[in-house]
Image (cartoon, rainbow, N blue to C red):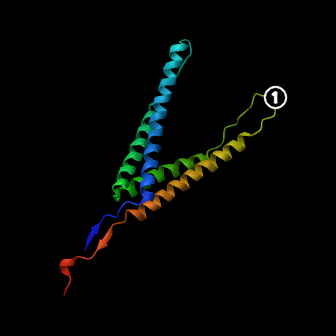
Amino acid sequence: MSAVRPERTDLATGICVFEFLAGCMPLATLVLLGVIRQQTLTNRPNVAMHPLPAILGFVSIFSAALTFAAAIALWQMRRAAFYLFAVKFAISLYQYLRLLFRVPAAVTLHSHRPTPITPDQIRTIGLLVSLAGVIFLGAITWYTYVATKPCILPDESNEQV
């Protein structure tokens, strides 16, 4: 018996393109933050700016590298794509659960006007959007598991005639 890699479907191609574009977002965010900081320091030298945390850069680069690796592996229909997407799913699920069980900080609004949306509503919307992202990534992970499963072909040399 020999295993053959399955052919890439249109959905797999779409996921690869989506993941490639999604991988560019953390890098673009780092570049944009750097440009904004530089412009602020150039135009207003007396503004005190704290340095960006090193962990932000590390997490952004790690996230982009994981996303690019998963997209490339899925493009080639390798089984490693499933494992990379599973790692991404586990990280996003951990972040969602951490956000879900975090005690919301007391937010005081210094406005005398009534606000159209409360901080609790903002937190609920954030949780729902994050949950949708976790579910979407879970669906991509499940599809990658099914799509990259090797096809087992019978060995022709062992067949009896």
Q: Quadrant of residue 150?
A: bottom left
| Residue appearing at x 53%, y 55% in the figure | 136
Q: Is 5 drawn above or below residue 61 in the view shown?
A: below
Question: How many other residues sit within 10 Å of disc 1, few (<14), some (14-19) or many (≥20)?
Answer: few
Image position of 9 (left or right of 113) = left
Residue 56, position as x, y percentages in the image: 47, 34
In which quarter of the view is residue 105 placed?
Answer: top right
**Which is more toward the observer, 93 or 104?**
93
- Residue 105, compared with residue 111, is above or below; it is below
Question: Which residue is nearer to you in this view: 8 or 136?
Answer: 8
Q: Is residue 33 left or right of residue 126?
A: left
x 52%, y 24%: residue = 36
Q: Secondary structure at mark 1?
A: loop
Residue placed under numbered mark 1 in the picture: 112
Location of residue 94 in the rendering, given as x and y in whole percent from the top left corner: 52, 50
Residue 76 in sight: yes
Q: Residue at x 81, y 28 (%)?
A: 112
Query: Which residue, as the protein is rendered here, is positioned at the far front?
Result: 10
Q: Residue furthest top?
A: 46
Residue 78 on image: x %, y %: 33, 58
Please name the residue shown 48% across and 49% down the image.
91
Amino acid tagged 1: His
Quadrant in the rendering for residue 82: bottom left
Query: Is 107 rendered above or below residue 150?
Result: above
Q: Is residue 9 left or right of residue 159?
A: right
Q: Quadrant of the N terminus?
A: bottom left
Whole-percent x and y of residue 15? 45, 53
The reply to whether residue 52 is visible in this rendering is no
Which quadrant would the C terminus be assigned to in this image? bottom left
Residue that extends furthest to the bottom in the rendered view of this protein: 161
